[in-house]
Amino acid sequence: MPDTDNAFQAALDLILGLDPTLLGIVALSLQVSLGAVLVGALIGLPLGAALALWRFPGRGLVVTLLNAFMGLPPVVAGLLVYLLLSRAGPLGELGLLFTPTAMVIAQSLLVLPIIAALTRDHVRSLWDEYREQLHSFGVTRLRAMPSLLWDARFALMTVILAGFGRASAEVGAVLIVGGNIEGVTRVMTTAIALETSKGNLSLALGLGLVLLGLVALVNATAYLVGERARRKLG
């Protein structure tokens, strides 16, 4: 097993040398995480806005479930998707288990509640502020939804980045439904766990540095977006 200094140098060499194995794992990680965030945003943004604008039977239960699922343990999400996609499960015939698609589904289950619940909070605040004015112009809730989502775009971008941060750092769910198959479903987090257990610290450190840089980039972007929103809104 290499010592830490040598492993760190080897990790930098892998990154700077654009090692194909490392790049392949990073590319698949981005593909899966971005896919999950896209699914979460397409469902979560209108769902959150609808919960902010309308009152209907069962709305309280939906809000409670969304808030509860924001803290859903990744291994539980992975187990639920595994049961759904396994050969004996209701969607087993689709053959999605141990594929990147199954990983996207599992990560979407983790990202969706975050995006929907936080979108509801932001849109509700804007609706409380603009409701009387919009009513005076005869704007219905349905017509107001796109405008409110657009007005909250900077805050919602921060929400989406938070969802991406959750997805990219997740390991339990993707390990259960993806299987960590080399060249097929191996992403950064699962590869780090595997390579560390094998004593291949150089690749594990290289992937760890890339993941750390990615998380730092997401947080910096979220901060800049938030600052821009605060300046714009005064």
Image (tube, helix red, strand yellow):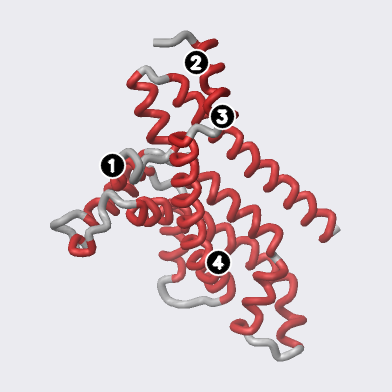
Considering only order in the chain, which callout, 4 or 1, is on the residue closer to the N terminus? 4
**Is 2 situated left or right of 9 in this image?**
left
Mark 4–mark 3 distance (CA, rounded to whole Å): 40 Å
Q: Nearer the viewer, mark 4 or mark 3?
A: 3
Q: Residue at x 83, y 59 (%)?
A: 232
Picture layout, residue 203 above or below residue 65: above
Mark 1–mark 4 distance (CA, rounded to whole Å): 30 Å
Q: Return the mark for residue 17.
A: 3
Secondary structure beneath label 2: helix
- Asked if the residue at tag 3 contacts the one at tag 4, i.e. Cβ–Cβ closer than 8 Å, the answer is no
Residue 152 or 28: which is nearer the viewer?
Answer: 28
Instruction: Please give the residue where the numbered disc 2 appears in the rendered image.
Output: 7
Instruction: Please give the residue where the numbered disc 4 appears in the rendered image.
Output: 45
Considering only order in the chain, which callout, 3 or 2, is on the residue closer to the N terminus? 2
- Asked if the residue at tag 4 contacts the one at tag 1, i.e. Cβ–Cβ closer than 8 Å, the answer is no
At label 2, the amino acid type is Ala
Q: Nearer the viewer, mark 4 or mark 2?
A: 2
At label 1, the amino acid type is Gly
Picture layout, residue 101 above or below residue 184: below
Instruction: Please give the residue where the numbered disc 1 appears in the rendered image.
Output: 179
Q: Residues within 10 Å of mark 4 (few under 14, many from 20)?
A: many
